[in-house]
Image (cartoon, rainbow, N blue to C red):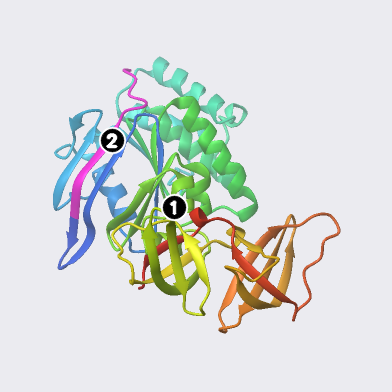
Amino acid sequence: MESTAGQSLTLDDIVHRYGGSVAVDHVTLEVAAGELVALLGPSGCGKTTLLRIIAGFITQTSGKVVIGGRRIDELPPAKRNVGIVFQNYALFPHMTVAENVGYGLAARGTDKHAANKRTAEMLEMVQLGHLAGRLTKQLSGGQQQRVALARALAIEPRVLLLDEPFSALDKSLRLDMQIEIKRIQRAAGTTAIIVTHDQEEALGMADRVAVLSQGRLEQFAAPSAVYDTPATYFVNQFVGTANVLAGTLESVGTDGTFVHLDDGTVIPARTPAGLAQGSKVVACVRPENMRLADEPLGALAGTVELGMPLGATIVHEIRTASGQRIKLSEPRMPGTVPREPGTRVWVKPVTASSVTVFAAP
């Protein structure tokens, strides 16, 4: 069998409509060979529709799907050589683990000896060789997931598609399986697309994350860039937690960018694109990028309302003088306890680069 692992995937200006509604709105993605990309977004954002378009289960209204430099739009699902792991794994309960893994090979008419060898290789890769003869209905959820992954990889797919693969697993098992799937994907050298609405899952597993909203691509970047420098207000609000401070863009120039907050405080910020001085804006700062200040210059005055020790960190909720609640997260040293409710404090962003500015929604 010719190896097809690690092939590039291009979604070129994909549009898909259901009746009068647009499910995918001019989405373009270039996925490198061997890359793991997460499609992240809320329900109804278009991520599952894109996955089904790649697989060939539905035909897009317009645009092109290209794998390994070859356009595959006219090919039926069985001819696209795309591996799929569904939410419910879709295993055959009356078949053994080995029979499930080898099913796709048998369906393609692969020589029995070669199919048995490939099946054994895949079972060793997912560390289930010792369970080859067991029925899949006798396995745990995590084991079933690995069988489904081995079956998808056995056919040496050009692209591996994972549709919410952890949704059926207990939370305690999810992290282990995320690590396991990434290990297996790396070992196989397979290009992979994972659909998820879980931001931690996407940020932890993917080489790059495509954030979608209402069918549109909001940002496609490395996880650190999506989190640290969100491209749009939607990404800022959907990924992670951020304090949102209303104000006016006071100055943009060589001396830096400053936002005059509605409570009168002036804070430095990262320079936004396409916004002029005097624009109504929101300055967004993640809780871990806020710190307690020793003096009021450039800081918001507030009162501690609540402190929560969360293992290695402490999260304080602080009500500012204008009545807004903001969150501040800081490392917790051994023996450190939260500040008492009612404590007067000043808080400010750590750096200008930690403050992202958007036009006021």
Please indicate, yes or no, whether residue 42 appears anywhere in the rendered image: no
Q: Residue at x 48, y 52 (%)?
A: 227
Depth check, front residue: 4 or 199? 199
What secondary structure is marked by label 2? strand
Q: Is residue 288 left or right of residue 205?
A: right
Magenta stretch bounds: 1-15
In the rendered image, residue 244, in percent from the top left (x then y), is placed at 48, 70
Q: Residue at x 36, y 72 (%)?
A: 360
Residue receiving disc 2: 9
Residue 281 vertical position relative to residue 59 in the rendered view, above or below: below
Residue receiving disc 1: 229
Label whose residue precedes the other's in the sequence (2 or 1): 2
Depth check, front residue: 74 or 66? 66
Depth check, front residue: 35 or 361? 361
Q: Residues within 10 Å of mark 1 (few under 14, many from 20)?
A: some
Please state which amino acid type lies under the numbered disc 2.
Leu
Please state which amino acid type lies under the numbered disc 1.
Thr
